[in-house]
Image (spheres, helix red, strand yellow):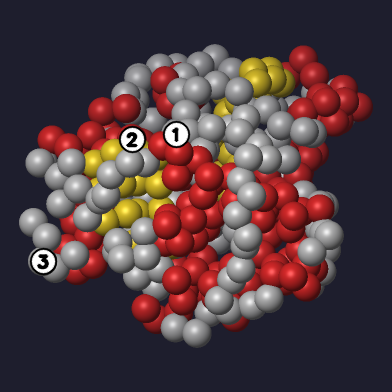
């Protein structure tokens, strides 16, 4: 069976897809299942002129909205680029973004197409203050779920939480299969170390949805309680300057290191003690599994896929979103008791090895692919 993995941007971009798909490709190729990757160049814009229509709703009602128009134009560009670059057929296409899925099915309607929904663009836009709930952009983006359900041959997602999130927007949620992300253990090498001052680390895009403002306020609280620590922030984004200014205002700037974007943070992560990310929403939260495989104690918010990875008090700590005092209390627990921190990290590592192994993902994907192409070997 020859398979095409259709991504949105190239796999060097940060995120769960980039953390997994290149390693999935490597495993499938070694097993004799030829697999290629395809994506849209990040700088390609405004090339496509295709007329866009959807089967389940009228896109014309959203015409003139800047966010919708940009989304539709990107869809046109993906079609244009695919026509330009792909000159052969595949037995199956596995898409990892709605635009990739819809474009591929339009161009190759007879090819079985599996689609994994990894995240919610509309929820991210709402949390980042870009759109309003129930506004036109929100209605357009949530309508895409129904379009995908009618268009693709098999719909997957990465957590039970996200499948539940989609329930209002699709007709057959029970048919959506959950395959949690998995990771190649060879990438993660826990390192025995002792830090005189506890080292906290977070890895994410610097956007409001990740809750780093809450983290900084929690760290200011910890400092007032007399705790020493260093917070390492890996990632970049539109609110970096705002976060740096907040660190200054909270008298934290000397306790924080802003690194900017890093391609392989897992190579850096094992030298730290605690991974913390107070996201306001996460479909899965790949970076928690990656941090667990690096043997770090986990502290996260009780939202989405994070709460499916962490059992509070067993393999990490969960706190409500948008509550800096609760986050400070959780961080105090892991900073004040190294033995407790170690036990949480060990339990997190054991669960991540078992639940988020790449071998498990490969096995589940082979089953899905075989069901989609029963007559192809």
Residue 86 is situated, as x and y percent measured from the top left of the image, at 37, 41
Query: Is residue 199 or residue 152 the one in the foreground?
Result: 152
| Residue 311 quadrant | bottom left
Residue beneath label 3, please? 375
In the orientation shown, which residue stands out farthest toward the right?
249
Residue beneath label 1, please? 11
Callout 1: helix, strand or loop? loop
Who's the residue at 79% across and 64% down the image?
63
Asked if disc 1 and disc 3 are in contact, CB closer than 8 Å, the reply is no
Callout 2: helix, strand or loop? helix
On the picture, is 195 further left or further right than 86? right
Residue 357 is situated, as x and y percent measured from the top left of the image, at 27, 45
Q: Is residue 344 visible?
A: no
Residue beneath label 2, please? 22
Above or below, comparing residue 354 to residue 37 in the picture: below
Residue 249 is situated, as x and y percent measured from the top left of the image, at 91, 27
Q: Residues within 10 Å of mark 1 (few under 14, many from 20)?
A: some
On the picture, is 11 further left or further right than 76? left
Asked if disc 1 and disc 2 are in contact, CB closer than 8 Å, the reply is yes
Gap between marks 2 and 3 measured at Cα: 26 Å
The circle drawn on residue 37 is none
Viewport quadrant of the C terminus:
bottom left
On the picture, is 205 further left or further right than 340? right
Gap between marks 1 and 3 measured at Cα: 30 Å
Observer-side mark, 1 or 3, equals 3
Q: Is residue 88 visible?
A: yes
| Residue 45 quadrant | top right
Mark before the other along the chain sequence, 1 or 2: 1
């Amino acid at each position: 069976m020859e398979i095409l993995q259709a991504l949105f941007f190239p796999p060097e971009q940060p995120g769960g897809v980039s953390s997994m798909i290149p390693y999935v490709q490597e495993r499938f190729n070694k097993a004799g299942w030829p697999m290629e990757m395809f994506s849209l160049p990040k700088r390609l814009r405004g090339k496509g002129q295709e007329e866009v229509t959807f089967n389940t709703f009228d896109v014309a009602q959203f015409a003139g909205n800047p966010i919708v128009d940009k989304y539709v134009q990107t869809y046109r560009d993906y079609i244009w680029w695919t026509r330009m670059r792909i000159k052969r057929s595949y037995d199956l296409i596995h898409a990892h973004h709605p635009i990739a899925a819809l474009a591929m099915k339009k161009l190759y309607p007879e090819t079985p197409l599996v689609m994994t929904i990894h995240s919610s663009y509309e929820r991210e836009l709402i949390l980042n203050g870009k759109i309003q709930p129930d506004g036109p952009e929100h209605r357009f983006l949530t309508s895409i779920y129904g379009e995908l359900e009618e268009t693709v041959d098999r719909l997957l997602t990465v957590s039970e939480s996200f499948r539940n999130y989609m329930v209002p927007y699709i007709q057959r949620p029970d048919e959506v299969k959950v395959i949690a992300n998995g990771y190649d253990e060879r990438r993660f090498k826990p390192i025995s170390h002792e830090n005189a001052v506890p080292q906290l680390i977070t890895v994410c895009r610097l956007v409001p949805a990740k809750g780093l403002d809450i983290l900084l306020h929690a760290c200011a609280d910890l400092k007032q309680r007399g705790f020493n620590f260093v917070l390492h922030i890996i990632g970049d984004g539109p609110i970096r300057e705002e976060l740096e200014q907040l660190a200054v205002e909270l008298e934290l700037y000397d306790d924080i290191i802003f690194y900017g974007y890093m391609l392989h943070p897992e190579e850096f992560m094992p030298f730290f003690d605690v991974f913390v990310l107070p996201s306001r929403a996460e479909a899965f939260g790949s970076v928690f599994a990656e941090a667990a495989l690096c043997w770090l104690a986990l502290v996260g918010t009780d939202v989405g896929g994070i709460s499916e990875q962490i059992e509070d008090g067993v393999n990490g700590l969960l706190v409500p979103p948008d509550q800096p005092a609760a986050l400070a209390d959780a961080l105090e627990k892991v900073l004040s008791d190294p033995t407790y921190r170690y036990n949480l990290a060990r339990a997190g590592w054991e669960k991540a090895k078992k639940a988020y192994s790449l071998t498990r993902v490969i096995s589940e994907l082979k089953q899905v692919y075989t069901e989609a192409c029963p007559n192809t070997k």
